Image (cartoon, grey):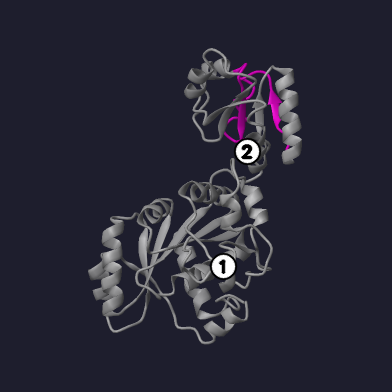
Amino acid sequence: MQPILLTRDRSLADEVARLSAAAGVRPDVYDDPLTALAAWPRAPLVLVGADLVAEVAAARPGRRDGVHVVGWAPADGVFRAALAIGAGTVGELPVCEAWLVDLLADSEEAPGRGRTVGVIGGAGGAGASTFACALGQVSAPRGPTLVVDTDPLGPGLDRMLGLESAAGVRWGDLASSSGRLGARSLREAVPRSESGVGVLSWASGGASAPDATVVREAVAAAQRGHDLVVLDLARHGPALVDELVARCDRLLVVLPATLAGVASTVRLLDRLGPVSGAVLAVRRGGVSWDDVERATGLPIAVEVPEQRGLLEAVDLGLGPVRHLRVPLARAARQVLEEAA
């Protein structure tokens, strides 16, 4: 299914066709809003020319995401009509050319967004980063997967996946960019392993927390361009962590079943407050699972197993999942199936 453009303005149609060619797509053009109603709900992207937006509003198409108004200059009533059809933006050409190309390029993706699983350590050294990488490695053969490193003080997920020397975009590159980040652009730019898992992390050397605006743009683009996005969340930096947690469909809190581990997790959860979809991934320890659930108020979704040769696999650049039969892979698969 192609994007659709509704306009009678030939110069606008020609300009959108030119920009579409740069994005690698070819929209279907309609000059009558009523004939476009059948395609309206199914098209991955709907562009409405400023010349027809009032007529489109009068046709009362169903509300949906991915509707945008484009034109040469704002005209009387355009913004009111755009609001009536639920348009996300009103773009003025030629100012919005780069934005429109990215929007058209993203239209190749399936409608909606990929699932987002956040992984956070209930206690320091719980193994959250390891489990985040395992989720990415297990998911990658099923579809486009990206693991996002949000902890500048962590080990670096590209190192854990053996991609520290691979060419590709890091957080520092995104911080210096401007404009809308395209889903396809991000997917093709990040370092990616042979198995298909991509990673967004930091270049070697000093690292600082990315600006919240950059994180929002990157996560949104990742969700549009991947079936699964795994966010490895830092335990510090409350404002950014809270925002990322709110973007997750499932939050996995990794902790050891020890008195110290449970106490630290309780403090973290108290600070986060109620989180929809939060569950525990627990390493065995001296505290019973019943007591862990009672203290935290969250259910245990999976046991994080001990895995022989884990450190060696990471040191060899193979990531925590050497092959899909190791215990960590089975635990990751269980989480992904339950989160589906």
Image spot of residue 164 (x, y percent): 62, 69
Residue under label 1 = 205
Q: Is residue 60 above or below residue 199?
A: above
From this viewpoint, is residue 26 visible? no
Image spot of residue 177 (x, y percent): 60, 47
Which disc number belongs to residue 103? 2
Looking at numbered disc 2 in the image, what kind of residue is underneath it? Answer: Leu
Magenta stretch holds residue 163 = no
Q: Which residues are magenta?
A: 25-52
Left or right: where does residue 43 sit relative to residue 133? right
Separation (CA) of disc 2 from disc 1? 34 Å
Image spot of residue 48 (x, y percent): 61, 24
- The N terminus, quarter of image: top right
Image spot of residue 217 (x, y percent): 53, 46
Q: First in sequence: mark 2 or mark 1?
A: 2
Total labels drawn = 2
Q: Residues within 10 Å of mark 2 (few under 14, many from 20)?
A: many
Q: Secondary structure at mark 1?
A: loop
Q: Residues within 10 Å of mark 1 (few under 14, many from 20)?
A: few
Left or right: where does residue 274 sit relative to residue 54? left
Q: Is residue 139 above or below residue 81?
A: below
From this viewpoint, is residue 18 visible? yes
Type of secondary structure dominating the magenta stretch: loop
